[in-house]
Image: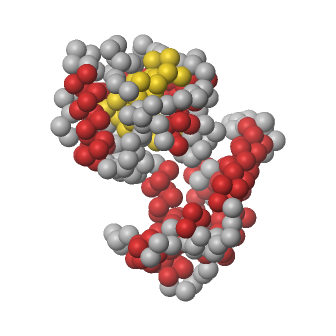
């Protein structure tokens, strides 16, 4: 498997900057494609206004979440390198990779790479195959991400939303229903998530925790609870209405919480630094789960 050594980041917004830094700091030849002139770039980072003559090993695009905009980028890349298209990854978090690849000459070279904010410090990155991507190419990209210090979650089949966002939206869909129905407040839901769900997931994940707790009681609870969950195929109208009213959260001063008078950047920096401290705590092993070992056979 030929290792990826040259990476081109197409788009240099907040996410693109963070991702470019992780590759440059890890010794990759890192190029940024931007339509505007960039200055004050970190060391080992080169900016270009046109695609370079020699194809990179991997291109990751971070342009706006509009299918036509992204597809125009893929067409530009394939036109620039007709003899040997690089691997092309979309940085989308929610668009359908199968739809994005329509019209590509080499859809087998296409995949998804989903970073989380802040991209330079969040440890997990999702790598997902497109409809025709070879497993070996997915593994090549995952290997490159490991070399930047990331912990890839690998999906060998395309599915809208990757893995983490699907889990998040399944939980949030139920949470929004509980708020809208007057069952629980946003504050109580967040308190339960912070003090109960999150600590257990930090230590044992989602599935392993059920093995530890016992699957019999879990299966019994499923039969009782799952039929009563809020199942529908419609985005929550309460949330959609909030966004239409401009109640978009911290930056607008109002969302589920009242953020009026808050220093937006200070709140975001605090959240980022708290996450970094928690991740370091878990990484050093102090708060990490005990190593999984098979029980020894009982003496006879």
Drawn side of residue 151 relative to residue 232, left or right: right
Question: In which quadrant will I find the C terminus?
Answer: top right
Question: Which residue: 53% across, 18% down?
Answer: 28
Residue 33 in view, yes or no: yes
**Is 103 located above or below residue 220 in the figure?**
above
Q: Is residue 226 left or right of residue 188?
A: left
Is 234 placed above or below 206 here?
below
| Residue in the picture at 34% in, 23% down | 51
Front-lying residue, 264 or 99: 264
| Direction bottom: furthest residue | 182
Residue 75 position, x and y percent, is: 23, 32
Report the residue at 55% width, 67% height from top: 252
Q: Is residue 77 above or below residue 277?
A: above
Total marks drawn? 0
Judge from the rendering whether residue 187 lies leftward or rightward of residue 108; answer left or right: right
Splitting the image into 4 quarters, where does residue 41 fall? top right
* Figure coloring: secondary structure
């Amino acid at each position: 498997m030929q290792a990826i050594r040259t990476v081109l980041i197409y788009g240099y917004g907040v996410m693109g900057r963070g991702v470019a830094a992780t590759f440059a700091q890890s010794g990759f030849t890192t190029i940024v494609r931007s339509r505007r002139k960039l200055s004050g770039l970190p060391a080992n980072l080169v900016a270009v206004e046109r695609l370079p003559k020699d194809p990179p090993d991997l291109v990751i695009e971070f342009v706006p979440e509009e299918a036509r905009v992204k597809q125009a980028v893929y067409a530009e890349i394939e036109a620039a390198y007709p003899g040997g298209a690089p691997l092309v990854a979309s940085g989308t978090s929610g668009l359908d990779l199968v739809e994005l690849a329509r019209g590509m000459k080499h859809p087998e070279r296409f995949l998804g790479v989903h970073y989380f904010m802040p991209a330079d410090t969040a440890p997990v990155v999702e790598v997902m195959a497109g409809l025709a991507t070879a497993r070996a190419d997915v593994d090549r990209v995952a290997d490159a991400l490991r070399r930047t210090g990331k912990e890839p979650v690998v999906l060998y089949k395309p599915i809208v939303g990757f893995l983490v966002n699907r889990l998040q939206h399944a939980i949030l869909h139920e949470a929004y229903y509980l708020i809208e129905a007057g069952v629980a407040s946003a504050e109580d839901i967040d308190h339960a998530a912070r003090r109960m769900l999150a600590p257990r997931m930090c230590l044992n994940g989602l599935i392993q925790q059920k093995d530890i707790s016992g699957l019999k009681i879990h299966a019994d609870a499923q039969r009782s609870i799952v039929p009563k969950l809020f199942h529908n195929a419609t985005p929550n109208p309460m949330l959609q209405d909030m966004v239409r009213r401009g109640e978009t959260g911290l930056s607008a001063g109002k969302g589920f919480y009242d953020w009026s008078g808050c220093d937006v950047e200070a709140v975001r920096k605090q959240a980022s630094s708290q996450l970094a401290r928690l991740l370091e705590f878990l990484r050093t092993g102090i708060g990490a789960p005990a190593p999984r070992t098979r029980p020894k056979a009982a003496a006879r």
